[in-house]
Structures are given as structure tokens and as C-alpha cells.
């Protein structure tokens, strides 16, 4: 590698470093916004779960169809949440590996897709895609997904509904998660302690609890999407930070190589001058 090639490499890597640095900063801003969205809905979720827990303490939840298991149906539906873009490290790969490790797919399985990466994964599995929201706003599609799975579940067309997504833990970690959305289990909405506050509910506690459970299920889909987005931007931020650091290290080593080649060139030129001078002196 000559001096000119090294200089061109340093320049091109420097340009890449600027791009990765900009992408890192953009991902950091988007991650913060996704975290803020999750925090804004935290109080709502807390009060919703509290109300469900307190009301369900004196209500027979088995009367709700949301708790019923459609044993005669073998079809499962997976709401698969991934990303549309790459450059986020092993964010999607870890989720796919976790899914394959924990779920044995069958020909009766159906998929509702969020993200082009999940679409490619399901296509490789030869899975049946019922709905694909990869080309639309994920958050805006929550109601459509919920209405679809709820209608098919109540009509006994499917047995179980699962959420498959990356749960946001921190800016440095996301955890692949598979959660059962339907049917509901008694443990999902029970706490060890129940409030003793009396409630006067009209027309009935059962109908009011049913409405709360519907809101709870829809919110779980929305929360999964928000957490997946936060995890995506966090993973992309870390991936771009690593790329930026690696580019800086490459530039450092190439700069040393450039200086070495330049010094060698100067040394050779000096040797040529000295050799020429000595040749002239010998001739004279």
C-alpha cells in the first residue's frame, strides 16, 4: 500500500465515521423519546392494573370469554414485532434465535407482522402471515391488531395469541420476550394483596371488569411496540458507537502507517541526494 492509497483510506474512513456518529446521535434522541412515551403511559397502566385487581377480587373471572381456552382449536397467532431497518447489531437476530429455541412451529401457526425483518424471518419459516403492518405506523396499527385477534379468539378461530418482541431493560440491554396475550390467566391480573375499598358499580362489576380487561390487552400490545422501538434505537445507538470507535481506531493506525511511509519516502529521497552528491564528488 502506497502513501496515496493510505491517504484515500483515511479520508474515506473519516467520512464513514462522520455518518456513524450522526446515526448514533439520532438513535439516542429517538430512544429517549420512546422512553418518554413509555413513562407517560406508566401511570395509566398502574391504575388500570390496580382497578382490575381490586374489582376482580370479588368477581368470578371464569365467566369472561377472555379467560376461556379454546381447546378444540389448534391454531396459534404470534404478534411478531421487529424492525424495518438494520444497523442495530444483533437486536433482531437474538429475538429470532429465542423464538426458534422456545417455540416449535406448526403448519397451523399464523403471524401478525411488525417490521420487514420479521417478515423475512417468517417467510423463511414458510409461516402464514395474516396481517403485515411493516409499511405503516406501528402505534397507529395497535387497535387494528387487537380487534383482529380478539374477534378471531372470541369466534374460536384461534387457540392462543402470543406477543413476540424485545423488552426494553436499559440503554445497554434488551431481552427477547414471548408473552401470552390470550387467553388471559388468573395470575396475570392478581396481586398478593387486594384493596378493601368498596365499589358501587353499575350496571355490574362483571361488565365493567370486561371493559377494563379489553383496555388492558390493547395496552399490552401498545407497550410491547413502544418497548421494542426503545430497544431498537438503543441497539442502533450502541452499534453506531462501536462503529464510530472502530473507525477512529482504524484512522489512528492508518495515520501511523501514513507517517511511516512518508518518513521512508523522505529517507529514500535523502539517500538518493547523498548518493548523487557522492557520485559527483568522485567524478570530480
Image (spheres, grey):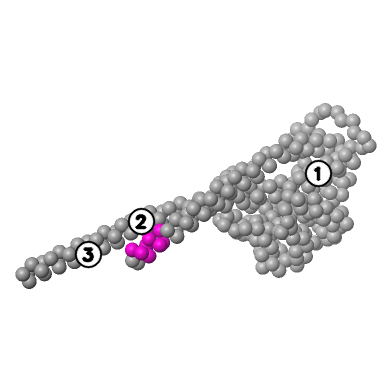
Q: Residue furthest left?
A: 284
Secondary structure beneath dot 3 equals helix
Report the front residue among 247 and 228: 247
Quarter of the rendering occupied by the N terminus: bottom left
Image-quadrant location for residue 191: top right
Span of residues in magenta: 3-10
Q: Residue at x 82, y 59 (%)?
A: 158
Q: Residue at x 86, y 42 (%)?
A: 211
Q: Earlier in the sequence, mark 3 or mark 1?
A: 1
Q: Residue furthest front?
A: 284
Q: Position of residue 37 (x, y in %)?
A: 68, 42
Q: Which residue is mark 2?
A: 255
> What residue is pinned by disc 1?
215
Residues marked 3 and 1 touching at CB (< 8 Å): no
Q: What residue would you read off at disc 3?
A: 268
Front position among marks 3 and 1: 3
Furthest residue toward bottom: 283
Is residue 163 something one can see in this rendering?
no
Amino acid at each position: 500500500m502506497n502513501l496515496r492509497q493510505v491517504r484515500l483510506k483515511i479520508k474515506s474512513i473519516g467520512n464513514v465515521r462522520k455518518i456513524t456518529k450522526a446515526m448514533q446521535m439520532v438513535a439516542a434522541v429517538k430512544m429517549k423519546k420512546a422512553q418518554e412515551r413509555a413513562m407517560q403511559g406508566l401511570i395509566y397502566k398502574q391504575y388500570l392494573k390496580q382497578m382490575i385487581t381490586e374489582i376482580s377480587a370479588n368477581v368470578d373471572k371464569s365467566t369472561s370469554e377472555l379467560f376461556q381456552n379454546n381447546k378444540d382449536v389448534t391454531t396459534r397467532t404470534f404478534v411478531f414485532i421487529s424492525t424495518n431497518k438494520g444497523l442495530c447489531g444483533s437486536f433482531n437476530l437474538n429475538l429470532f434465535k429465542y423464538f426458534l429455541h422456545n417455540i416449535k412451529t406448526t403448519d397451523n401457526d399464523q403471524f401478525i407482522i411488525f417490521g420487514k425483518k420479521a417478515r423475512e424471518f417468517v417467510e423463511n419459516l414458510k409461516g402464514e402471515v395474516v396481517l403485515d403492518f411493516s409499511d405503516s405506523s406501528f402505534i397507529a396499527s395497535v387497535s387494528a391488531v387487537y380487534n383482529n385477534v380478539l374477534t378471531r379468539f372470541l369466534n374460536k378461530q384461534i387457540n392462543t395469541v402470543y406477543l413476540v418482541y424485545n423488552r426494553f431493560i436499559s440503554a445497554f440491554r434488551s431481552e427477547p420476550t414471548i408473552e401470552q396475550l390470550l387467553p388471559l390467566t388468573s395470575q396475570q391480573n392478581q396481586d398478593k394483596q387486594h384493596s378493601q375499598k368498596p365499589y358501587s358499580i353499575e350496571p355490574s362489576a362483571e361488565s365493567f371488569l370486561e371493559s377494563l380487561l379489553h383496555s388492558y390487552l390493547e395496552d399490552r400490545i401498545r407497550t410491547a411496540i413502544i418497548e421494542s422501538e426503545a430497544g431498537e434505537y438503543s441497539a442502533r445507538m450502541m452499534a453506531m458507537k462501536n462503529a464510530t470507535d472502530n473507525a477512529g481506531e482504524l484512522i489512528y493506525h492508518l495515520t501511523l502507517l501514513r507517517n511511516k511511509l512518508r518518513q521512508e519516502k523522505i529517507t529514500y529521497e535523502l539517500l538518493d541526494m547523498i548518493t548523487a552528491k557522492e557520485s559527483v564528488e568522485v567524478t570530480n
